[in-house]
């Protein structure tokens, strides 16, 4: 079996070591004997998602994010078709904001997003920074780090999880204390650091979704010895919930 992982614009959207998420997916595939080919899509490249199995959209600074928003809008149809056909997409921080209807810059300028999910992001002078633990119905406890001035409000979409430590999507009281979004096989989240090495269960879920989309629902993943990863994950959860930094 083979999966193709596409990393969108890593030269601009790698502010939070998003390549670590790509490496994590690749290695967890290879450890199971699954070939994982990684391709980096640069800003000047055409976007062809016909053979892509997992798409990664990372985070960047304000200038980079505005530049990427303009480029992504050119391929909005292709990305929407990929999403609606259950393509696996992980969008992190700024990438999460770009999935929605619009995001607001520090100058209060609205930048149109991909309109793939029902959400929008307002700018706040108060950055939301710190460690986060969320409880996801599908993936269990997820840990990460957030650092964003965006206040994202999701509409008719499910959140990735409920916040049990940290801020999450926003702190403006307009929604329950939730983090991220799930739509079909799309996950958007403010959690980075990178995210997937800290949460092997989530990484495997993305791999499995991609395999089943490509090869059918009977596909299963071989078990890996994640004892070290699980101990590290549980230690982080327990430490944060005790209020330690």
Image (cartoon, rainbow, N blue to C red):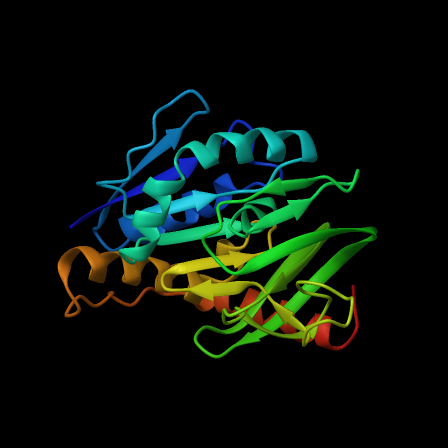
* Count of number-bearing discs: 0
Residue positioned 50% across, 69% down in the render: 157
Residue positioned 62% across, 55% down in the render: 120
Q: Does residue 205 appear to the left or right of 239 in the view shown? A: left
Coordinates of residue 80 in the picture (x, y in percent): 36, 48
Q: Does residue 132 appear to the left or right of 198 in the view shown? A: right
Does 193 sit above or below residue 223? above
Residue positioned 17% across, 66% down in the render: 219
Q: Does residue 202 appear to the left or right of 28 in the view shown? A: right
Q: Does residue 198 appear to the left or right of 243 in the view shown? A: left
Quadrant housing the C terminus: bottom right
Coordinates of residue 194 in the picture (x, y in percent): 56, 49
Is residue 219 or residue 169 the one in the foreground? 169
Q: Quadrant of residue 12?
A: top right
Q: Quadrant of residue 200?
A: bottom left
Coordinates of residue 190 in the picture (x, y in percent): 61, 55
Is residue 8 or residue 184 the one in the foreground? 184
Is residue 237 or residue 104 the one in the foreground? 104
Asked whether residue 190 is in view, the answer is: no
Coordinates of residue 56 in the picture (x, y in percent): 43, 45
Residue positioned 39% across, 35% down in the render: 75
């Amino acid at each position: 079996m083979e999966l193709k992982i596409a990393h969108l614009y890593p030269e601009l959207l790698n502010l939070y070591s998003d390549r670590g998420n790509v490496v994590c997916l690749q290695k967890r595939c290879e450890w199971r004997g699954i070939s994982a080919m990684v391709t980096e899509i640069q800003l000047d490249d055409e976007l062809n998602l016909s053979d892509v199995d997992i798409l990664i959209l990372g985070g960047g600074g304000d200038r980079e994010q505005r530049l990427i928003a303009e480029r992504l809008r050119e391929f909005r149809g292709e990305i929407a078709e990929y999403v609606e056909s259950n393509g696996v997409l992980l969008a992190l921080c700024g990438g999460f904001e770009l999935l929605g209807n619009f995001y607001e810059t520090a100058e209060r300028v609205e930048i149109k997003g991909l309109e793939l999910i029902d959400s929008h992001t307002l700018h706040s002078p108060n950055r939301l920074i710190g460690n986060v633990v969320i409880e996801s119905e599908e993936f269990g406890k997820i840990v990460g780090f957030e650092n964003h001035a965006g206040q994202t409000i999701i509409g008719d979409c499910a959140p990735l999880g409920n916040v049990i430590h940290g801020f999450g999507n926003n702190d403006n009281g307009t929604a329950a204390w939730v983090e991220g979004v799930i739509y079909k096989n799309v996950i958007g989240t403010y959690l980075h650091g990178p995210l997937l090495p800290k949460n092997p269960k989530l990484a495997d879920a993305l791999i499995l979704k991609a395999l089943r989309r490509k090869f059918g629902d009977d596909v299963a993943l071989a078990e890996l010895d994640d004892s070290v990863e699980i101990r590290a994950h549980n230690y982080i959860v327990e430490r944060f919930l005790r209020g330690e930094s």
